[in-house]
Amino acid sequence: MGAGLIGRRHAGHVAREAELSAIVDPDPGARSVADHYNVPWFQDFDAMLRGNRPDGVIVATPTQHHVANGLQCIGAGLPALIEKPVAADIAGAEQLVGASEAASIPILVGHHRRYNPLIGKAKAVIAAGSLGRLVAAHATCWFYKPKDYFDVAWRTQPGAGPVLTNLIHDIDLLRYLCGEVASVQAQVSNSVRGFDVEDTASVLLTFRNGALGTLTVSDTVVAPWSWELTAAENPAYPRTGESCYIIGGSAGSLSIPDLALWHHPGDPSWWDPISRKSQIHETGDPLALQVRHFSNVALGREAPLVSGREGLETLKVVAAIDQAARNGTRTAIPARPCPISA
């Protein structure tokens, strides 16, 4: 559902990893996407159900439609992979997750970076205790969006800024790697472009395990330090060879995505030499791996790696950042009822 930029990328991966059943999009231009893959095109969900019922649905529609489209899937008994963010607000996300859990119809959220093998390796390094007790983490998300990016009107309006659009991925990974967030503090600015949405934000995270995290995001900085320019996930972005995350603990530190593990060979001391060891990991396209996983979830073979509730918890952190920035206060995040999925 949805044949925009990310929808077309999903369609290509589905065609290679599974079987593409149909394209659903009211825009007549979506017919060309369906024709390219030689599959039916439907303008609405109900017509698709009458003509070509699939095993699962990827919802790649605009964020404001995620809840309605997700509820359509749940009502039809179809597992769904819903692009991030899972909803435009917490109330909608809770409604969607509640319906999914009540009906026992799984939904996944498209935080695809968790499927990257290098993130799996980073998670394993941390879980093995190689960093000791986690103390601090930092994520840099700096890049420059060209002027024509903002020719689309909604991209200059509240909710379309780099915090919800871009930083949500980084927040999700820090949650996955470092644990749940207890509170946030934040500042935002629109001083460069002057739109009704931020172009820069600075965030302080306090994790429930006592670690502190800092994040900065800007879509108006010319720089090499962002996931897109460092992880080589999407060939549309040039790779810089830099890193954008640093996670530090009492026994060592890890940079990502280069997976350099730093530690002192003897007792930790800033007077003594420190060594660097690169971590070996498998490679793979996260979007392809996500589609493969979703196929297995839809067929009842696997449990979701990034469930609807996981997407909800990440969205809660983003909403807290927005509140903290508006109010100038430290904003607490209620504890979740169950542990983060592995």
Image (cartoon, rainbow, N blue to C red):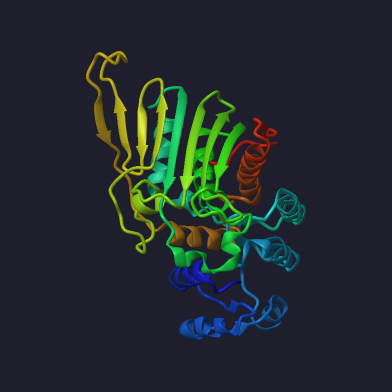
- In the image, is residue 67 above or below residue 42? above
Q: Quadrant of the N terminus?
A: bottom right
Image location (x, y in percent) of residue 223: 35, 48
Q: Is residue 219 left or right of residue 71?
A: left
Left or right: where 91 falls relative to 275: right
Residue 52 seen: yes
Q: Is 49 situated above or below 234?
A: below
Query: In percent of the image, x 25 and y 19: which residue is there?
Result: 265
At a point 31% along the width and 42% down the height, the residue shown is 258
For the point 47% across and 82% down, the residue is: 37
Coordinates of residue 186 in the picture (x, y in percent): 58, 36
Q: Is there any visible trace of residue 59 in the rendered image? A: no
Whole-percent x, y for residue 85 in the image: 60, 54
Q: How many marks can you see? A: 0
Q: Quadrant of residue 336?
A: top right
Please state if 238 lies on the left or on the right of 273 as rendered: right
Give the x, y percent position of residue 321. 61, 40
User: Can you name the residue that lies furthest to the left here?
Assistant: 273
